[in-house]
Amino acid sequence: MAKIITSVKRAFDILDLFFEDTQSLSKPEIAARLRLPRTTVHEQVQTLLASGYLEKDENLPNRFTLGFRVFELGSIFASRLDPSQECLRVAKEVSKACDETVQMAIRDGRDVVFIIRVDSSRILRLVSAVGSRLPAHCTAVGKMLLSALSDQELAGLYQKQRRLLRMTSNSITSVKRLIEEISEIRKRGYAYDDCESNEDARCVAAPVYDHDGNTYAAMSITVPATRMDLKRKIELSEAVQVGAKKLSRRLGYGFNRVIEGSAAT
């Protein structure tokens, strides 16, 4: 294992504190949160100040904020980011970890369009493929994406729909029932497809956010219905949420919040 340089890691640990929705910090606060000696924190802060990664808070004495150098570095990273490649990379990681099929989709009106699919080592017959579209209300990714809409937007989207398309005997066909399901998904933070688009497959999906905090896409893990017992359901629910959060970070989610103070100075 490669050697970790402690002083460098401590510097990054200090910068990481600003991910906690913190606008400014004092040296005693940094020392307490990281459990470091104050002399060590003093040296680290002075180094970060000299490098431009921290700045003195102009409004509060003896407190420090992120420096403009953080904004510059983040902007360079964002300009070189290829979202499609990041999506595929993380989808492959999630699929490899659980050995199940991972898909990603975006919403187009009342439909979802699948943009990524990574198959597991075990054959799984699906009705979806990259580029195909399905009714959002019949899929885990679709319901996850619909949950990003406000109640008013959701009602407007389905206002002329008396009955929703049925793909299987488990499909939601009532707008009222769909709205109830969406409400539960918002509370839960992830969505299920219980054989609603394919009688032989079950899915669990989680949201992926972009750098502005908007829902960019939804990621799902799909398994044969016979393999989705309660234990596996819990495992995959956790796995897809971890994967979606990792991808959101890779797409810059949280970046604007962290650097907002430095960009404004």
Image (tube, rainbow, N blue to C red):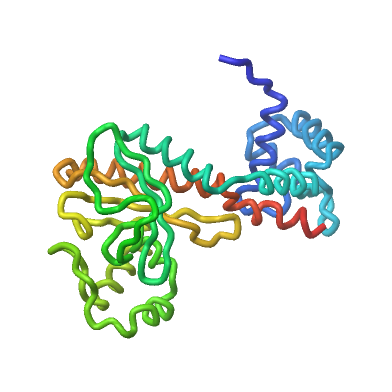
Q: To which quarter of the image does residue 32 belong?
A: top right
Spot occupied by residue 169 in the image (x, y as percentages of width and height): 12, 64
Name the residue nearer the viewer: 79 or 261. Answer: 79
Q: Residue at x 64, y 20 (%)?
A: 4
Spot occupied by residue 156 in the image (x, y as percentages of width and height): 39, 82
Q: To which quarter of the image does residue 154 belong?
A: bottom left
Where, quadrant-wise, is the C terminus in this rendering? bottom right
Spot occupied by residue 78 in the image (x, y as percentages of width and height): 66, 48
Name the residue nearer the viewer: 16 or 35. Answer: 16
Q: Is residue 260 above or below residue 83?
A: below
The answer to whether one can see residue 102 in this image is yes
Picture mark count:
0
Where, quadrant-wise, is the N terminus in this rendering? top right
Q: Residue at x 84, y 37 (%)?
A: 51
Q: Is residue 5 left or right of residue 230?
A: right
The answer to whether one can see residue 219 in this image is no
Q: Is residue 161 left or right of residue 262?
A: left
Residue reaching furthest to the front? 131
Name the residue nearer the viewer: 135 or 176. Answer: 135
Q: Residue at x 47, y 53 (%)?
A: 208
Q: Is residue 102 left or right of residue 34?
A: left
Q: To which quarter of the image does residue 168 belong?
A: bottom left
Q: Is residue 242 above or below residue 165?
A: above
Q: Is residue 80 left or right of residue 140?
A: right
Q: Is residue 61 above or below residue 147?
A: above
Spot occupied by residue 162 in the image (x, y as percentages of width and height): 24, 83
